[in-house]
Amino acid sequence: MKRKLLTAGGVLLACIVFFGVLAAASRLVAPKYHDALIEGHLTGEYYGEPSPHDVLFVGDCEVFEHFSPVVLWNEYGITSFIRGGAQQLVWHSYYLLEDALKTETPKVVVYNVLALKYGEPQSEAYNRLNLDGMRWGTAKIGAIRAGMTDGEDFMSYVFPLLRYHDRFDKLTQEDVRYWFKDGGPVSFKGYVMHAGVNPATEVPSDPHETQLPESSMAWLEKMAALCEEKGISLVLIKSPSIYPQWYPEWDAQIEAFAKSHGLRYDNMIEKSDAIGIDLNTDTYDQGQHLNVYGAEKLSVWFGRELQTQYDLPDRRSDAALAEEYAKLSDRYEAEKQRLITEDN
């Protein structure tokens, strides 16, 4: 009996050592998304949030580069976070939202509709940017399974070493520096700041289907049902970028969806003048995304709309929140000045 126990103990110890080494090696070779390709860091930053939020954004770069939670707080006392990601497709957004709703219930969820044009998984690289930082649970498992492209393996998400084993001879100082620790936030509650100015130019017209894919609309239906179940107001938006194009047929389809579900839908391209967006000065990449000047204008306009329609509380009298956002605002302004100086 004693020998059997020793043998069992040895096997257990060997398993612990094996999986410990596997986990450590996986952590080393997996991209860190802190100094480079920072979009991959955004998903994980949500879990460090010290307080809940009245507004959550989900969607692609048209949320994480277009809305400033700092401005929403400073102007209206709205607490918010952007669970955005590079080419975050609708099933990513759904599961990231489902994950967030396990620990908080915002009053409003804002979803940007551009990614609905994709009805099928597009890219492993973008899957990784959105999902590597997501905590393990049923939502992450669902997101991986929904988004895997041909040739991807579920176990490579569990043990990144299986995917990144060829990076051992390509490791950088970033990999070593953040092997066992996180380097802190790269965003401002999910907002990624740019201060460059590159005016919009002529917009090319891409081939497109007249209707958004049924599969992506089915995921939007699931998102609407999830929000209704939780008593959350879902707001659909199209951010005011001019490329990739947002076509009238798609716009009409989203308007019809919003009307049939009793949802608000804002096509902000059409409201750019009212918002004050000038794509000669408010974009850093010829009209595809807003710079900080455009994002601040959009946030002032949208914050007022949200507070008016959804009666969001002004929480600036909350001492703990005021302290949290004061520190965030200081970091925000310092980064803004650094980028302005750098770009000039």
Image (tube, helix red, strand yellow):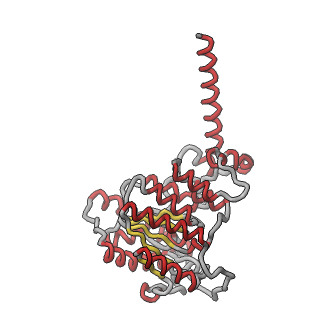
Query: Camera-side residue: 256 or 282?
Result: 256
Rendered location of residue 328, percent (x, y):
40, 62
Q: Is residue 327 left or right of residue 277?
A: left
Q: Is residue 110 left or right of residue 173?
A: left
Tell me which residue sits at (40%, 75%) in the image. Answer: 262
Tell me which residue sits at (57%, 65%) in the image. Answer: 88
Tell me which residue sits at (61%, 73%) in the image. Answer: 213
Query: Camera-side residue: 330 or 141?
Result: 141
Tell me which residue sits at (51%, 78%) in the image. Answer: 254
Q: Quadrant of residue 313?
A: bottom left
Rendered location of residue 137, percent (x, y):
51, 48
Q: In this rendering, is residue 59 above or below 148?
A: below
Q: Is residue 305 visible?
A: yes
**Quadrant, the C terminus:** bottom right
Q: In this rendering, is residue 120 above or below 43?
A: below
Rendered location of residue 339, percent (x, y):
52, 71
Q: Is residue 329 visible?
A: no
Q: In this rendering, is residue 317 above or below 274?
A: above
Rendered location of residue 208, percent (x, y):
66, 80
Check the image and name the residue furthest to the left.
Answer: 317
Q: Is residue 32 left or right of residue 95?
A: right
